[in-house]
Every structure is written in C-alpha cells, then in structure tokens.
Image (cartoon, helix red, strand yellow):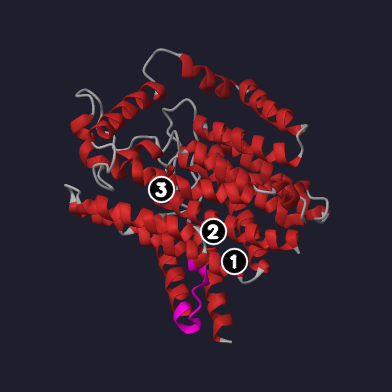
Amino acid sequence: MLTKKINYISEFFLWVLAFGITLANAPVEVSTYLLISVFLIKIIISRDVKFLRLSISILFSLLFIVIFISAIRSSYPGESWRGFSRVPKYIFLFFSLFDFFSNDKRRMIRFFWVVIAVSAITFSNGIFQSIFGFDIFKHNTINPLESLRRIQSSFYDANDFGAYIISVLPLTFLFLNRGLSRVKRVILLVICLLGFYCLLKTSSRGAWLGLLVGISVYFFIYNKKLAIIIPVAVILLLMITPKGFDRVTGLFKPERNTVWERTILWKTGWSMVEENPILGKGINTFSKYFPKYKPADYPDLRYAHNSYLQMWSEIGIMGLLLFLSIPLSILIRALRGIKLKASYGQQGLILLGLIAGYIGFLVHSCFDNNLFSLVLTTLFWVFSAYIVSLDNYLKEKVNA
C-alpha cells in the first residue's frame, strides 16, 4: 500500500515536471528533487536496486568520475562544483524515472498523453503570441524591431522553443495508428499541425534541420516510401514561405548574420579546446574563459552555440565521448529490431516518435545550447529514461 502511494506521488511530480519544462527553471528544479527524494525513499523501503544492473550504469559512473576530476582541477572551483552538482541530479532523475516507468506500462501511456496535453497548451500559447505579440503565461513579447517576429511561447527564446517542438512533435504522429479512436487521431493531427506552424514561426534553422533528420528516420522505419516524400514536402513548405526562404538563403549571404556569429563562437570554443583537449578547462567554466579568447571587438556572449564543442572545452574529449556514448547506446539498443517494435500497437509508435524527437534534439544541439539549458537538459534525460523503459517493455512483448 505504501509503495502504491509513493508511485502516485511520483506520477504527480512527473506531471508537474512535464508542464514545468515549458515554463521556468524553478518548477523543474523543485519537481526534479522531489522525484529523486521519493525514489530514494522507495529504495530504502524496498531495498530494490535492480536499476544498477543496467549496462548504462557503467557509462554514468565513468562520466561521473571524469567530471569529478574536471571539477577538482578547475581554476574556478565555485563555478565547477556548481556544475558538477548537476551530474548526480540528472543521473538520479534518469534512474528514478526508469524505475517508475518500468513497474507499470500504463504509466508510460498516461505520460504520453500528459506530454501531448502539455504540448497542445504550449503550442496554443505560441500561436496566441504570434497573433497578439505576447504569450499568456510569462508575457514574453515579440521584439517589434525584428522582421521575423519569431515566437518563443513561454520559453527563454525561439531556439529553445524550437528544441522543445522537435522533441515532442514526432509523438503526435501516433495519429497514423488506426487502432486509436477517430477522436484521438483527429486531436493528435490538430496538435501536430499546431506544432509544425509554431516551428515555422520560431525561424530556428537548427530546429528545422533537427526535425528533418528526425522525421526522415521516423518514416524510413515506418514506411520507406514516405521517407523521401515527407521530408521533401517539409523542405518545400519551408521554402515557399517568404520568411522561411529568407532564413535558408540567409545562410549563404556574406554580411554579418547568425552564421557569421556562430563561426566566431565556434572558433573561440575551438581555441579553448586546443589548449586543454583531453581534460578540458573545467566543467561550467566556458563563460569564465570566453572573454579571454573572443575577438576584442566581439560582444561578450557566453555560450558556444554548439553543445558538444562547449562540452569538449569544459570536460575534455574523454568527458564528451563518455557523454555521447549514453544517448548513442540508448539509440542503438532502441533501434535494434525497431521495425518489429514499431508494429506493436501504440507503444511501438510512441517509441518510434521518441527516437525521432531524440535524434532531432541531438542534431539541433550541434547549433545551439540545448544541453546547457536547465529545462531542455531535463527534457533530454526524461526522454532518455522514457525510451529505455519503453524499449525494455517492447522487447519483452516481442520476444514473448
């Protein structure tokens, strides 16, 4: 009975977390620590540590050690220990959610509909902002001097909103499942269209590319005939919209623009990497070193706009490779036999949607700071645990 109550509490905090990711850091932090606390209480009561038998536990342990060494040798100990404190938080969040999902398949389905409901609210908020100039929840306003009129909904900026959209949008493709009721399929289709419209209005080229890669993978697995048709249709849709066309052709214009800016940022980040390629300069220190390495006449921006380059500069190539081995191992395991898994009812298509969104997020992270945003990093680890749990469940069903 006590375990059942604990699971109810965990589910409530997870729902709060799902909504909090679209709003602000505070609800994300609070709900994350409450989820972890409830998980630890459950471990103490049940003495069940089967989650430690996951092969990914070894990768987490090695990453923990490398980042610990990075923090010890940092010239900015305060910043680095603050950054290091996030590592056990995300590790425990991953295991707490894996444990939660693994004990009941119905929780995985309920959480899917929670994510869909939250995304519907967030997309609607974005559309409201595009019409009236501000969003409902945080009153974020569209810059009146910006010709693109980029929307961000309740996120920090348009690129963050784009990262969220491409992570959850492939989940709405469940409308393709004829096993669902017509009402649910129509709802999912409408939310899909709302999300795609919002993605267009973010004008986030990195997110556009991430979505193209993600849906290419999705439809290559789901239906190879659509693997070319759907991405080509998306590209054409982007190109026929005036602002979309300008954003794409703007990549090749010589004047100072975001491409020029990112080139400067990446060169600066690479200069840091060249000095300390193996162990890096210390976790969470990029912004401290940036003024030293940036061009003298360049505004003092603090992030590399490439999550992997910034990670390399902070925790070295060993830390970067260990980090990348975690999502890669998750994807490799999930993609093994995915054709058969995807054919297994709605759970199969949910897994396929998660994989597509996960890949899109990782691609977008090449061009932005997704893995250095608290809310987006939390989303990443929530979906990591969700994929592993759902994949394990489907493997058991397929092999039964």
* Percent position of residue 247, x then y: 51, 23
Quadrant into which the N terminus falls: bottom right
101 is higher (above) or lower (below) than 280: below
Disc 1 marks a residue whose amino acid type is: Phe
Expressed as whole percent of the image width and height from the top left, the position of residue 108 reads 64, 63
Q: Nearer the viewer, mark 3 or mark 2?
A: 3
Quadrant assignment, res 237: top right
Using residue 184 as the reference point, say whether residue 278 is left or right of it.
left
Q: In front: 303, or 28? A: 303
Q: Position of residue 127 (x, y in %)?
A: 58, 41
Mark 1, residue position = 101
Drawn side of residue 267 relative to residue 12, left or right? left
Mark 2 or 1 closer to N-term?
1
Task: Characterize the local packing of mark 3: few (<14), some (14-19) or many (20 or more) Cα atoms within 10 angstroms.
Answer: some
Q: Main secondary structure of the magenta part?
A: helix
Which one is earlier in the sequence, the residue at label 3 or at label 1?
A: 1
Q: Which residue is mark 3?
A: 322
Callout 2–callout 1 Cβ contact below 8 Å = yes
Q: CA distance from mark 3 to mark 1?
A: 25 Å
The circle drawn on residue 66 is none
Q: Secondary structure at mark 2?
A: helix
Identify the residue at horizontal 49%, vertical 51% (top origin): 380
Magenta-colored span: 43-52
The foreground one among 154 and 264 is 264
Q: Amino acid at mark 3?
A: Leu
* Tag 1 secondary structure: helix
Q: Which residue is mark 2?
A: 385
Look at the numbered disc 3 and give the secondary structure of its residue.
Answer: helix
Q: Is 46 a magenta residue? A: yes
Identity of the amino acid at label 2? Ala
> Does the residue at mark 3 contact the one at mark 1 (Cβ under 8 Å)?
no
